[in-house]
Image: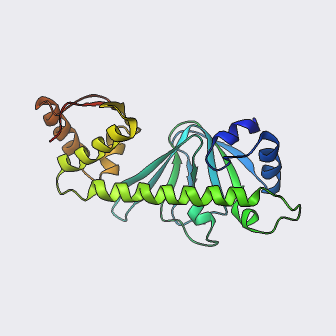
Amino acid sequence: MHYFALSDTMLFHGTTEKEAEAMLACLGSYTKRYEKGELIYRCGETAEALGLVLSGSVLIESDDLWGNNSLLGRVKAGQIFAETYACIPGEPMLVNVSACEKTEILFLNTSRLFAACENACAYHSRLIQNLAQIFAQKNLGLSRRILHTSAKTIRGRLLSYLSEQAKITGHCQFTIPFNRQQLADYLSVDRSALSNELSKMQREGVISYHKNSFALKRGE
């Protein structure tokens, strides 16, 4: 493993290559590879370790008893998942986590992170501080999704989400991380209805798009 790459992630921000190597040994880390569509964590399971995506990406999804799927987010390389459940021993997961493509995951034991280190590792506090910032950012992400899905119409939800993407990128042309079904799940709408509304918005000159690339033409 190239430990220097970990320092580019938010979890290991502020660490050197040697520090990252020491922390991985201290935290009992291990890596595992997954194929596209393979489950990493299943709803109802417990998680003892948080996952850091080294390559590829994973989907966080929720299914109800009737088979309705809701996409909660996509975790890309350098980002973490299952950290909340890993910090609460025995808490069953309410979501499924699966590989969106060929993916490699680094797992870190959170119980070792919060326990006193027998090696007097000086870097635990830094990781805990970084983890706290990640928690805060993810809370903001959930708040954004609530904002996007609060609109009563599909167009309102689309405009809310696409406007945010334009603000994040600083451009009216951008690429979103979801395909059409994933976007529909994220916005909690029917895929066919979403596609129809996108086509209508393009005909009206509100947006233009091709697959997951979008351009905003004017406000509404």
Q: Is 116 or 155 nearer to us in this picture?
A: 116
**Residue at (32%, 44%) from the top-left corner?**
164
Position of the N terminus, as image quadrant, is: top right
Residue 61: percent from the left, percent from the top?
A: 44, 54
- Please name the residue shown 80% across and 46% down the image: 19
Quick one: quadrant of the C terminus? top left
Judged from this view, the residue extending furthest toward the left is 204
Instruction: Say how the picture is coloured.
Output: rainbow
Q: Is residue 132 above or below residue 175?
A: below
| Of the pair 87 and 143, the residue shown nearer to us | 143
Give how far across and how far down residue 201 sits, in percent.
Answer: 15, 36
Is residue 63 in view?
yes
Residue 91 image offset from top left, x and y in percent: 58, 72
Query: Residue lying furthest right in this view?
Result: 119
Query: Where is residue 70 shown, x and y percent of the image?
Result: 36, 55
Please name whichever residue, 10 or 88, is drawn nearer the observer in this view of the structure: 10
